[in-house]
Image (cartoon, coloured by chain):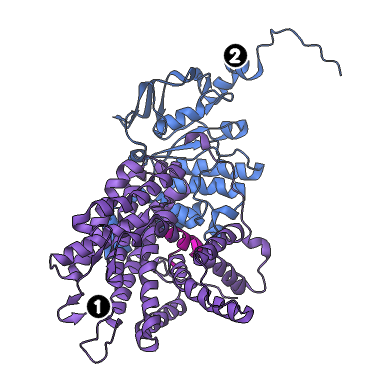
Amino acid sequence: MSLLKVNELTMRFGGVVAVDQLSFSVEKGEVLTLIGPNGAGKSSIFNLISRLYNANHGSIYFNDTEITQLPAHHIAGLGIARTFQNTELFEHATVLQNILTGCHVLRSTTALQHLFFTKKVRHEALEHRQRSEEIIDFFDLQSFRHSVIAGLPYGVRKVVEIARAVACRPALLLLDEPTAGLSAEESSDVAFWIDDLQKDAGMTILMVEHNMDLVLRVSDRIIALEDGALLASGSPQEVLEHPDVIAAYLGTGTGEQMDVTL
Amino acid sequence: MRHHFRTSYSQEIRSYEDGRQLMWYLLLLLVAIVAPFLLDEYLLGEATQILIWALAGMGLMVLAGHTGQVSLGHGAFLACGAYMQNFLVSLSIPFLFALPLSGLFAGIVGVCFAVPALRLSGVYLSIATLALGAIAEDIIIMLEPWTGGVEGVYLDSAVFLGIDFDRYADGLSPLASAGHNFYWLCLMVVLLVTIGYINLLRSATGRAITAIRDSEISARAIGIDVAKYKTLSFALSCFVTGIAGALLAHFLGAFNYEAFTILISIQLLMMITIGGIGYIHGAFVGAILIVLLPLWITIIREHVSGFLELGNASIPGLDQAVIAVLLILFILIEPMGVYGRWLKVRGWWRLFPLARKKMFRRHRTYLKTERLR
């Protein structure tokens, strides 16, 4: 059974077709990477799955439940968490508060109980605090625990965003370019974490990434997209050697040589 | 240099930093409780007014400071509370029971306004609330049977279980003279609301509303129902503002539409901005400044005109002008307000001698995914 199933999904921005009759599925426990040139519709697919965009046509199933029409705030509760391409953190809050906010869907108390900070709320607060600490440990964020996001370097922000997404124990994690803008070392850390999340935490990961080293290292499967449509899919090696993928990235080589005089 | 060494998670979720801070707050509370015995009647009136404005400020702070929804028309909800209180008291409902009911009424009006208005965001929401604040005066005048129209209303004196809470009452007990009981009542309400506010901020609801303020898109992605929490924030905000209005009604004794003009709404927003937007303390600091400013201006003006031999001519609009200049200066120099500045000073002192100027500079924000909005 597939964890996530996308059926003939289509989305248009006016006349531009961002996602075109796309169908694919994500199996439980795998790391699936979407690759493709800029404007191929990778991020649009993420926004469609997390319901920030509305599909014009087609359907999305998660655990055999249709989520195509659900409001965006129901998605995290079902078990889909995501990160954003250009970090969308809560700037005025600390790292710890960001991760605690990520625990939002795990709560079982109401606003009225919060107002009086009842015993149950206290118990839950301690539980979430413990959970956040486990996540802080996992991502090595101890030294930034009480730092406000606004003062943190970009590399750390990227990690905090993954940490916040993981906080709600998602079954499916959507990572939108997790290593964009990171140094080689930081990227390599991200690769380890993705591995751990998959193998130890049992998460399924759908990722958009341009860093091919990382893609080859962690992906079980790759889907290549161009102009919102499927170009190729399969094991990393298969996809990268696929003639259409090479053509999409590097051109076909049949065009006439340009004369360049310097 | 001071460092908090925590040994359990319960130290992190409690509402105060450490025993020392708790001690200071308890001391402050003690001073506030005995204040009526230390202050004369005029200053006690000012202190009561500070409490009432701090309450209204906290109401607006939930919405503007913590949810990021700036309202320029909160005077309307203040009016809702005040006139409802008058109406309920005139039905001979005990005024202490009428107080939460007036707040509830303001809260319900707030939700009725919020449901359509929260489709707007940012400056458009502010304009909508501004319209509400402007129209409130006219509505008050038109609803003459309940509001007394232009003439206004006179409240019955507030007596509950034989205890006279009226501001000018000669106390029945030997201890309580004019205004003591009313001051303590205001203090009690402010204390309860502050505790509720602190509790809210340290729980999931508080994190959800601040998340909406900082990034609505992220808030949705981590499962926060943005519309629900904005409405909740509006409801709480108007409830608290309504109670402040009801207390203000008793404080004024007699009032008409002029107590709730659009200027009051704007003054309320200026108050929390100068005090420190986004901090509970900011509401209190702002209230102290706004209430005491006219007093200080009078004192300074007397000195200046005595020195320059200008005579005792009053200058109309001087208070507003000074507040406006203060607001401009704060927005330019210290957008976090008086309390924000205090936090920086305290941070500098705590880290001494390791603090550096750059630690407190304003940081640029990184590129945001605006296109998702």
Q: Position of residue A34 (x, y in %)?
A: 51, 27
Q: Which corner quadrant of the image does residue B188 belong to?
A: bottom left
Up-down relation of residue B181 to residue A192 (above or below) = below
Q: Nearer the viewer, residue B47 or B24?
A: B47
Which residue is painted at 31% across and 68% down in the image?
A: B248
Drawing shade for chain A: blue
Q: Nearer the viewer, residue B123 or B362?
A: B123
Drawing shade for chain B: purple
Chain name for mark 2: A
Residue bounds of the magenta highlight: B268-281
Q: Specify whether residue B134 is in view.
A: yes
Kind of residue at disc 1: Asp
Would you say B162 lies left or right of A232 here? Answer: left
Kind of residue at disc 2: Pro
Residue annotated with mark 1: B166
Q: Nearer the viewer, residue B53 or B312?
A: B312
Which residue is painted at 59% across and 71% down in the image?
A: B345
Q: Position of residue A3 (x, y in %)?
A: 36, 31
